Amino acid sequence: MRQGTVFDVKSFALNDGPGIRTTVFLKGCPLRCSWCHNPEGLSPEPELYIKLARCTHCGLCLRGCSHPDCRPFGRCLHVCPQGNLSVAGRLVTSSELAERLLRDREIFGEDGGVTFSGGEPLMQADFVAECASLVGKRGVRRAIETSSFCPPDVYQKTLAEIDFVMADVKLMDPAAHRTYCGRDNGVILENLTWLKRSGKPFVFRVPLVPGITDTDENLSAIASFAGDCPVELLPYNPMAGAKYAAVGRAFPLPALEKQNQEERSRILQHFRNASMRQ
């Protein structure tokens, strides 16, 4: 059985695919999207997570301890009176994770199931595929939330074990994608083009980041690429930067507000226009 690194498992998730789902958040992402709202998922390694807003700076965690699980992090994880310290990320085998996910089968109903998210789940593609196969054999529907940034052979092999794909489409211009996501989008567009032709159920998800992804130029390009494919528009989350300090990172964007009604109408018009052109 393969091992993977997971930083959270959430039951009763309602926004990660059809129906009621249990979402697995996997560590590691090859992109560095400026608006990422899961900074604890960026590194592939387990890392210290500190709730700084509740910290009283008593210093107890820095006095050292003999706990083996604390040694990699240079402080005691167990002594904080407020319970502010934890580790984002733990190793599990695919069979251990599948067993945990199967405990939720009764809540899934007709449409729900398991969703693999992140981070970027395809950074742990073999682990995801093995776990998806195990739960799929027990009748559980499987979805994935992905940036589609991975080699095409890995993409196609892993998605063979997935029933429904939620694929990000962030920025169509390669230079803008490098600026705001840290990598070129060539392989992403190659994988998305394959996805459109694959016959596999999917939806394109567009994060609406003010002044970055919600420009008329970018939205027009996405609408043209998507054509009559299903598209979900994701409103900007103004709290995206709230967790960065907890894992020792700085949020790279200034404070932004999600779009107002007039701006949302402008955004929707791009996709109405694309639909009418089909």
Image: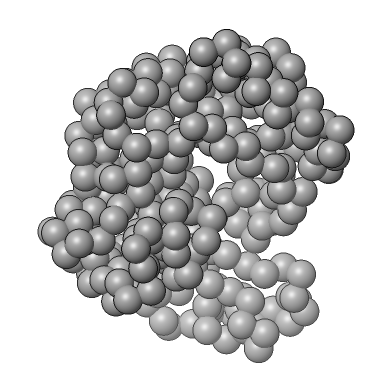
The quadrant of the image that shows the N terminus is bottom left
Position of 16 with respect to 141 (left or right) is right
Q: Residue at x 70, y 42 (%)?
A: 235
Q: Is residue 178 above or below residue 103?
A: above
Q: Residue at x 47, y 47 (%)?
A: 119
Percent x, y of residue 135: 21, 61
Give how far across and how far down residue 122 sits, in percent. Answer: 34, 40
Q: Where is 182 relative to 254, above or below?
A: above
The image position of residue 144, as x and y in percent, is 38, 46
Residue 194 placement: quadrant: top left
Q: Where 65 falls versus 113 (above or below)?
A: below
User: Along the horizontal axis of the image, is 250 left or right of 29?
Assistant: right
Q: Position of residue 103 (x, y in %)?
A: 29, 76
- Seen in the picture, residue 180 relative to 37 is either above or below; the reply is above
The reply to whether residue 121 is visible in this rendering is no
The residue shown at (46%, 26%) is 229
Left or right: 257 with respect to 150? Answer: right
Relative depth, front residue between 250 and 187: 187
User: Does residue 227 appear in this view?
Assistant: yes
- Colouring used for the render: one colour
Q: Which residue is more in the foreground, 204 or 84? A: 204
Q: Which image quarter: residue 137?
A: bottom left
Question: What residue is drawn where x is 43% and y is 83%?
Answer: 66
Taking 187 as reference, is 35 left or right?
right
* Tally of numbered tags: 0
